[in-house]
Image: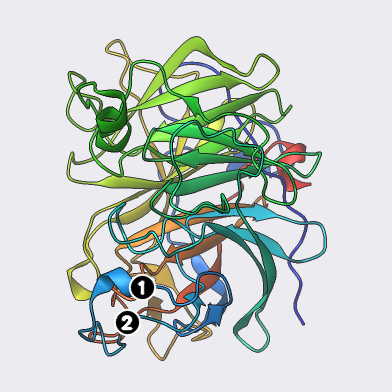
Amino acid sequence: MTRLPRLALTGLTVLTLAVALPTGGSAAPAEAERSGDFGPAVLTGFAKLPALTFVPASDPSGSLLGTAPVNGVTPPFADQPVQGFSGIARNGDGSYDVLSDNGYGNINNSGDFVLRIQRLIPDFGTRAVDAVGGINLTDPSGFVSWPLTRADRVLTGADFDVESIVKAEDGSYWIGDEFGPYLLHLDRAGRLLAAPVPLPGVNAPESAARLGVTANLGSSKGFEGMAASVDGKYLYPLLEGTVSGDTAGALRINQFDRGANAYTAKRWTYQLESPANAIGDFIAVDKQRFLVIERDNNQGDAAAFKKIYLVDLADRDRNGQVDKTLVADLLNIADPKHLGGTAGTFRFPFQTIEDVLILDNRTLAVLNDNNFPFSSGRTAGRPDDNEFITIRLDRSLHADHRVLG
C-alpha cells in the first residue's frame, strides 16, 4: 500500500492578496528567480472511492429526496453514503480525516444525514481509497442553544452545513459551517466543546431566520475554506460568498484568535476571477502565503474554470485587491503515464472541488466533493466517485517546514 508523506495543516497572516514570490527553500537560483504563473502540473497519483459506498449512520438516509432515480440510483438509501469530500486533515499514519458536508445540498433535505468525519486511506498502487472508520458529530453537553433535528443530539445536515476542517495538535477539530456562518470546536470524538461561534455582522439566511434579522450572505456561502496559521494561534476562515455591500466577487478572510476564542479586527479580501465563481478550499503555505481553489459551477465538458492559486496576504494593490499566481489548472494536467485514462491530458471536471493538501514542495493532493447522488462530471448519468489525485508542480512552493511536517 502506498502511503503519502506527512503533512501539516497551516495558516497565514496579514492583509489582502497579490503576486506571490518564492520565499526560502533550497531551489537552484534560476528557479528561485522565477515568478509568474506556474506551468502545467503532472498527474502522479490517482485513486477513487466508489460513489456507492455506505456506512451505518442515519438509516435510512435520503428519505427527503423523493423516490425518483437520480443519475441511476434511487433514494432513500439503506445506509448513509460516504460522500462530500468538503474538507481534509492529515493524520500521522497514512490516513486522512475527511469531512462530509451537510448531506444532500440544503437544510430542508438533509435531516437524515448525520454529520461525520470519515477516515480514509488512499492506495495509489491499486488506485483505490479505503474507508476505514470515522466519527459522528454530536452535542451531548447542549452547547447549541436552538433545537436540533435529533433528540439524541447527533448533528445532522439540517443543523449545520460543515465545509472546512482544521485538526489541532491536541487532536480536536475546528470546523467551518455555512449556515451561520459558525466556527465549531469539537473534541477528537466529535463532541462539541463550546457553543458555535458566529461571525459578527454576517448572517446567512439559515441563521438570519432563527435570529429574526436580515440575511446579508447567500445560502450555503459561509466558511467554505479555513486555514490555520503555521504556529497554530489563528484560524483564517474564508467565506464562499460576497457579503451584501461588498464588491461583487470579493470574499472576506477573517482572523480568529484561538486563545481568546474571538475574532480579531484583521480582515482581508480574496477577489474571484468572476463573481459567478466560488472557492473550494484555503490552506497555508507559510506565514503569509496560501493556496486557494477557485472554480466555476459547471461539470463535465462544460467545466471551464477549475484552478489553484497562490496568494500572499501581505501583498496587495492600492485598492486592497489581491493578486494571484496560478499554481495549477485542474482541467489541463499532463498525464504522460496515463494514470487517469488513455489521454495525455487529465481533467478534473467536477462541479465542486473542495480539498487541497501540500504533500511536499512540489506535490499537492486534490479531492472532489461528489455531491452524491447529484453530480455527474466524470460520466453523464452516473454519480461521481470521490477521487483523490496527486499532482506535481513545475516548481517549488518553498513552503514553511511546518507545512511539510
Q: Is residue 34 something that shows in the picture?
A: no
Looking at this rendering, what residue extends furthest in the front direction? 151
Q: Which residue is at a point 56% across and 21% down the rendered structure image?
A: 256
Residue 65 located left or right of residue 99: left
Sort mark 2 into few (<14), some (14-19) or many (20+) by Cα contacts within 10 Å. Answer: some
Using the image, determine if residue 208 lies above or below residue 120.
Answer: above
The one nearer the camera, 139 or 11, is 139
Tell me, for residue 226, which label it has, or none: none
For the residue marked with disc 2, what is the amino acid? Pro
For the residue marked with disc 1, what is the amino acid? Gly
Sort mark 1 into few (<14), some (14-19) or many (20+) by Cα contacts within 10 Å. Answer: many
**What colour scheme does the image use?**
rainbow
Residue 140 located left or right of residue 215: right
Quadrant of the image occupied by residue 238: top left
Figure quadrant of the N terminus: bottom right
Are the residues tagged 1 and 2 within 8 Å (C-beta)?
yes
Inter-mark Cα distance, 1 to 2: 6 Å
The one nearer the camera, 212 or 88, is 212
| Residue 59 place in picture, x, y as percent | 49, 76
| Residue 358 place in picture, x, y as percent | 62, 51
Residue 117 located left or right of residue 24: left
Work out whether mark 1 precedes mark 2 in sequence or the reverse, and give the earlier one. 1
Residue 211 located left or right of residue 19: left
Quadrant of the image occupied by residue 103: bottom left
Q: Secondary structure at mark 1?
A: loop
| Residue 108 place in picture, x, y as percent | 27, 55
User: Which residue is tagged 1?
Assistant: 62
| Residue 282 place in picture, x, y as percent | 49, 41
Q: Which residue is at a point 47% across and 74% down the rendered structure image?
A: 386
Q: Secondary structure at mark 2?
A: loop
Tell me, for residue 75, which label it has, or none: 2
